[in-house]
Image: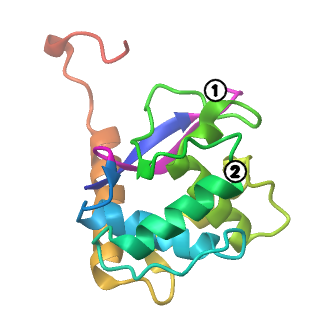
């Protein structure tokens, strides 16, 4: 399932990022796969592979596109054919290890396709484009709905006051 996490930049500012609940790869299905397929399709100017169909099924074409992405960034991405969830407690900063996460790399490339002047390793320069993904022309309805629901869930969770009887809200 697709969700939204808050990443932290080097200045301590919180920014929303798309995330998946669990590791996904060949044979996986669902809206989390649709998100990766869509982002892989957006990365094609940078990755030499066939455009995966955004159907929510990780099959051979999606696997080939992922392999091409991994080969394009051999020093940054683990070539294991899968996508892991982003860690919510991680600081995402230019030049740091965030780019080793394929989902972060794909979101950086997506932002760069929306604004070519943006450095793809500095995701926060164009975070507005990233969070507007549900409005992209041609985005499958199921993925648009899943992204919109994830944003609404994240917003409602952040808007709820903490319950003092549950202890501190900070780790």
Q: Residue at x 27, y 31 (%)?
A: 161
Relative to residue 125, is residue 62 drawn left or right?
left
Foreground label between 2 and 1: 2
Which residue is more in the foreground, 135 or 93?
Answer: 93
Scheme of colours in the image: rainbow
Q: Position of residue 40 (x, y in %)?
A: 53, 68
Q: Which mark is residue 12?
A: 1
Q: Position of residue 4 (x, y in %)?
A: 39, 49
| Disc 2 to disc 1, C-alpha distance | 27 Å
Say if 32 sits above or below 19 in the image: below
Q: Secondary structure at mark 1?
A: loop
Q: Residue at x 46, y 45 (%)?
A: 80
Q: Image quadrant for the N terminus?
A: bottom left
Task: State the residue position of label 2.
Answer: 73
Q: Secondary structure at mark 2?
A: loop
Tell me where the magenta segment starts and ends, as one range: 8-23
Which residue is more in the foreground, 11 or 92?
Answer: 92
Q: Position of residue 142 (x, y in %)?
A: 27, 78
Which residue is more in the foreground, 71 or 53?
Answer: 71
Say if 95 sits above or below 139 in the image: above
Query: Few, some or many C-alpha atoms within 10 Å of disc 2 (few <14, some 14-19, many ≥20)?
Result: some
């Amino acid at each position: 399932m697709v969700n939204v996490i808050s990443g932290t930049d080097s200045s301590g500012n919180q920014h929303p990022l798309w995330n998946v609940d669990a590791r996904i790869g060949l044979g996986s299905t669902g809206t989390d796969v649709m998100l990766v397929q869509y982002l892989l399709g957006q990365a094609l100017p940078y990755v030499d592979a066939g455009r995966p169909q955004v159907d929510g099924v990780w099959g051979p074409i999606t696997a080939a596109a992922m392999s091409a992405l991994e080969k394009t960034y051999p020093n940054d991405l683990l070539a294991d054919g899968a996508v892991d969830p982003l860690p919510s407690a991680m600081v995402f900063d230019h030049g740091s290890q965030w780019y080793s996460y394929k989902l972060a790399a794909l979101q950086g490339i997506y932002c760069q396709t929306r604004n070519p002047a943006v450095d793809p390793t500095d995701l926060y320069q164009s975070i507005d484009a990233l969070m507007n993904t549900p409005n992209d022309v041609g985005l499958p309805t199921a993925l648009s709905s899943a992204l919109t629901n994830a944003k609404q869930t994240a917003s409602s969770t952040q808007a709820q006051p903490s319950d003092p009887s549950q202890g501190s809200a900070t780790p």
